[in-house]
Every structure is written in structure tokens, then in C-alpha cells.
Amino acid sequence: MKTIPYGRQWVEEKDIRAVVNVLKSDYLTQGPVIEQFESAVAEYCGVKYAVAVSSGTSALHIACLAAELGKGDILWTSPNTFVASANCALYCDAKLDFVDIAPHTYNISVDAMKAKLYEAEKNDSLPKVIVPVHIAGQSCDMEQIYHLGKDYNFTIIEDACHAIGGSYKGMKIGSCKFSDMTVFSFHPVKIVTTGEGGMVLTNKDDLYQKLIRLRTHGITRDNQFMEGESDGPWYYQQIELGMNYRMTDIQAALGLSQLDRIDEFIVRRRELVRRYNELFSDFPLTIPWQYSDAHSAFHLYVVRLKLDKIKKTRKEVFEELREKGIGVNVHYIPVHTQPYYRRLGFSCGQFPEAEKYYEEAITLPLYPSMTESEQNKVIDSLLLALQ
């Protein structure tokens, strides 16, 4: 029995030819295609700079380093996310805390953030960095978060790993209109893929210069950043501790080719979502809620089971769907409940909205190459599982 996955890449002959052309070229890495990909993403998002890296996780890490997050500093993020959104704080030897989610968007709650900032100011424990996560592709309420950032002086790094192709208040997610930096992921289940890969976007010159150094060992060949005079054309200096987080030209070629079809991908995802929403109208579940002035990229399609109206647990529904070849998933297990984070002092019950969401959530298959017959199978199988 063929399984319908919750997400998958859509690679065509054009993408394959783009990769083969790089394999036949002089540069497999640190070549011209990386800059072409960066420029194309920057133009698409309406942002000044884009820095391609090896993964969304490495993008989060160097964004935090560029923000000078370090020992004694504090980062806040959502508990409803993949662990990378939190781990990036610990990579920098910083402290971490969470802000609970809003019950309708599943994104970080602005109201909860306001209350927590008010208390943190009194306790002299304000965050240096906040990482709002755009769950499933829908933007957080970034304008309100931006104004809070001005009031409380924190850096904003948008975790938009789900959200390239989406928009907020008429602007593409990634424009950094309401943030200092935005992070994308190009994992195969994401909107566009480079295999593995990520990107950091910013409009700030100083952050851009830090980012391009941090992804390559902290090294520069630019005389304006060196100490003393250059020894010659071969010369470089390591001026800070960086990483080897470079993307290859092979990956960038795939990403650049995929980017040509991003609008097609988004349109198809939204078509499938509309059909799900219409056909689920009488099902005992909650469909995704959307802002009126934002458009989700719909990386994921998450429903919440109305457990009081069905006679099964979420686990039973999940297992029945898997048995029928429906590759459902759950996004996400609240980060603060993970054993590693419990050992840091977090505990169940601290962020009740995220925990309640987790108890009810199921991610259904959604990807642009999904056929109507595949979607029908998902819908029919879910109807049976809920009975």
C-alpha cells in the first residue's frame, strides 16, 4: 500500500538539469550560483540582503550570533515549534524561555508576550532576542511584536522556516519590515527545497557583514574589516569565531530552479486547503484560522480534533490513519516538555495553550503535487477514523 506523506518535494526535469549543470561546471561550492540564489530570494521577498547557509538550524544559529546573543542574555520563543527555534539560544550559551501560544493562530501570543515583558522588566530579566515562529506558514502578528521590540529593546528574528511565499499586511514574509532578521528553511518538505539548506534575510548592513563572516569561519577578505594591511590577493583574516555553514552551488542550483515555481506551489497549496476546509465543514474538528490581512504559505495543514465529540483519542485516530496509508504527523510536541528541557527546569503545565493544542493536533497531507484522488483518500479515511 502506497503511503500518502504529510509533505514532499516536487522536483521536475528542469530542477535536475539545473543541478547537473552545476556538476558539470567549475564550481561545486563557493561559486556563482549561491549569489544568484541569494539575489533571487532577496528580490522575491523585497529585502536588501540574503545569506544562504546549510540549514534552517544554522541560519537560526548565526542570526543569534549576529545579534550578539551570549552568556547571560535571554532569548524567548514559542513552545509550539521544532526544537531548533529554542536550541539556537543554547548554542550561544544564552538562557531560554518561552511565551505561550494564541489559541486560534497557534503562533506566539502577543497578549502573553506583553504580560511577560511587563513582569520581566520589573525583575530585570528582559530578553535580548525574541524568535516568533510562523507556524504552518502563517505570519505572527509582527507589527505588534515590532512595536514591543522598540519599547523593550529586543532584537527580532523571525523563524519563517515554514513561510516563504506567504505574506503579511501586503508584504512578503522575509521583507524584514517588522524584524531585524528572517530565517528560512529549504528542507524537502518545505515550500521550496535545496535538499538541506537555509537562509537569513536582513535589511541591515552591519548584520549582513556579520552573517557572511559567521557562515565561513569568521573569515574576511575585505580590507575594511582587517587589522593592518593585506599581504596580497591571497590574504584573509579570521576576525571572529565563525562556523562552516556554507551552502553548496549544487543546493543553490536546485533552490534557484525551485524558486521559479514558488507562486505555482503556493497557489496549489491554497487550492488544496480551500478544498479541505469546505469538505471538513461538518467534521468534528477545527480547521486552520487565518488573519484577514495575511496569507499563509501553508507549509502544513493542521487540524484540531474536537475530542469531546468523538469517542476516540488522538492517538487512536492517528494510528487508524497511518494503517490506511495516510502519512499524518503531529506538529509539534511542545519544546518545554522534552526531556532535555525538563532537565533545564521546564515542566508540563507551564504553557497550557501549547499543551492543549498538542493534545488535539494532527497534520494532514499537503503538498503541491498532491492529486485530487489522494486528497479524497485522506478525507474519506479521516471521516471513517472519526466515527
Image (cartoon, rainbow, N blue to C red):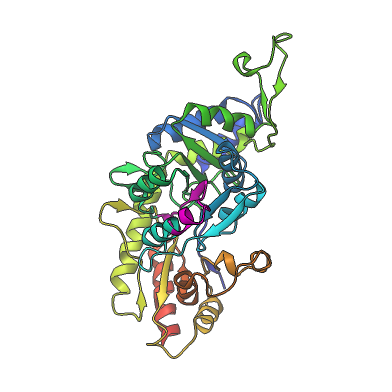
Q: Nearer the viewer, residue 352 or 163?
A: 352
Expressed as whole percent of the image width and height from the top left, the position of residue 116 reads 44, 60
Expressed as whole percent of the image width and height from the top left, the position of residue 268 reads 36, 54
Which image quarter: residue 230? top right
Which image quarter: residue 35? top right
Q: Residue furthest front?
A: 122
Asked if residue 85 lies left or right of residue 293, the reply is right
Q: Is residue 125 magenta?
A: yes
> Residue at image x 31%, y 68%?
277
Asked if residue 145 lies left or right of residue 7, the reply is left
Expressed as whole percent of the image width and height from the top left, the position of residue 243 reads 69, 37
Magenta residues, as a range?
119-137
Q: Nearer the viewer, residue 100 or 172?
A: 100
> Residue at image x 60%, y 50%?
89
> Residue at image x 33%, y 47%?
143
Name the quarter where the N terminus is drawn. bottom right
Expressed as whole percent of the image width and height from the top left, the position of residue 149 reads 41, 45
Q: Nearer the viewer, residue 287 or 62?
A: 62
Q: Is residue 379 magenta?
A: no
Q: Residue furthest bottom?
A: 311
Residue 299 visible in the current orientation: no
| Residue 260, placed above or below residue 307 | above
Name the quarter where the C terminus is drawn. bottom left
> Residue at image x 32%, y 52%?
295
